[in-house]
Image (cartoon, rainbow, N blue to C red):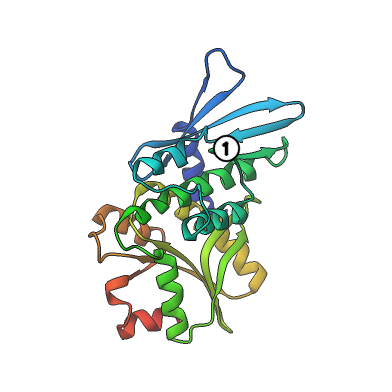
Amino acid sequence: MNWIEPYINEYISFLRKNTFINEKTGTDWVSISTPMLDNQNDAIEIYARMDGDKIVLSDDGYTLNTLKTYGVEFNRPGRKKELLDHILAVYGIQLEKNELITTATAKSFPQKKLNLLQAISETNDLYVLSKPHVTNLFWEDVEAYFVSHNIVHTPNFIARGISGLEFNFDFQIATLKKEILIKTFPNLLQGPIVNFLYGWADVKEARAKQSRKQVESIAIINDMAKEPKKELVEALSNKGSSILYWSKRDEDEALALLN
């Protein structure tokens, strides 16, 4: 047994124990409550129904309706709409009225479900645009930092894990001997951390075989607006991910980590 398998089995068991299914009364929809959390620390819930031989998955409009309460809306052209369209394009999600929707076959259901959850999670992060004078997102700051330090990188890097599922990382840095997969955290929350750790554990071995390089991960955490919770930082460290605090990005240790 490979060393990573117990961690993946542990995570799959955690997902199954914390996933709850209920029928929506009077409809043909089924609700799926997941252990992933939104920016209000509520469980992310999605909905599914059969449509012939296809499975329709939806967030029932919850994501954008919640952002609307923060004053973040996407009903006109502009920077906010561009950011939302970018996230939906990365994960292959459609926007119908106010709902995030995707359609799956029986075979593609696991990947499509994961894509919808990742899209919901990243769209949730757009709540930061409600703050006065916010003109960009944290990952944009990180990319500008890479450019300023001549760090060659690939944004929106998609990697397939040993489970067969694909995971999106904000950036990938490749050198002759190693590959670094990077996820940015503007606000350290349990849901995105859990999702990142599962993706990282699932992808690491597969990427090492494919690239024939040492594969590492870095979580870049914005610790300047709010101090990250110690237990979440420890979770990242315990699962083998390096940590780069944004407040220390110009220190030699941080730059060495990226090169």
Query: Total of numbered circles in the picture?
Result: 1
Q: Nearer the viewer, residue 14 or 46?
A: 46
The one nearer the camera, 141 or 134, is 134
Q: Residue furthest top?
A: 26
Q: Which residue appears at 53% of the width and 18% of the height? A: 24
- Say which amino acid is labelled 1: Lys
Query: Can residue 3 be seen at all in this image of the molecule?
Result: no
Q: Residue at x 48, y 61 (%)?
A: 79
Is 137 placed left or right of 202 in the picture? left
State the image coordinates of residue 88 (x, y, percent, origin top left).
Answer: 58, 51
Q: Nearer the viewer, residue 62 or 4?
A: 62
Q: Which residue is mark 1?
A: 97
**Residue extending farthest front:** 76
Residue count near mark 1 (Cα–Cα under 10 Å), binned few <14, some 14–19, many ≥20: few
Q: Residue at x 47, y 56 (%)?
A: 80
On the image, the x and y values in percent for residue 254 come to: 35, 79
Image location (x, y in percent) of residue 110? 63, 41
Relative to residue 166, is residue 97 depicted above or below? above
Left or right: residue 183 versus residue 244 is right
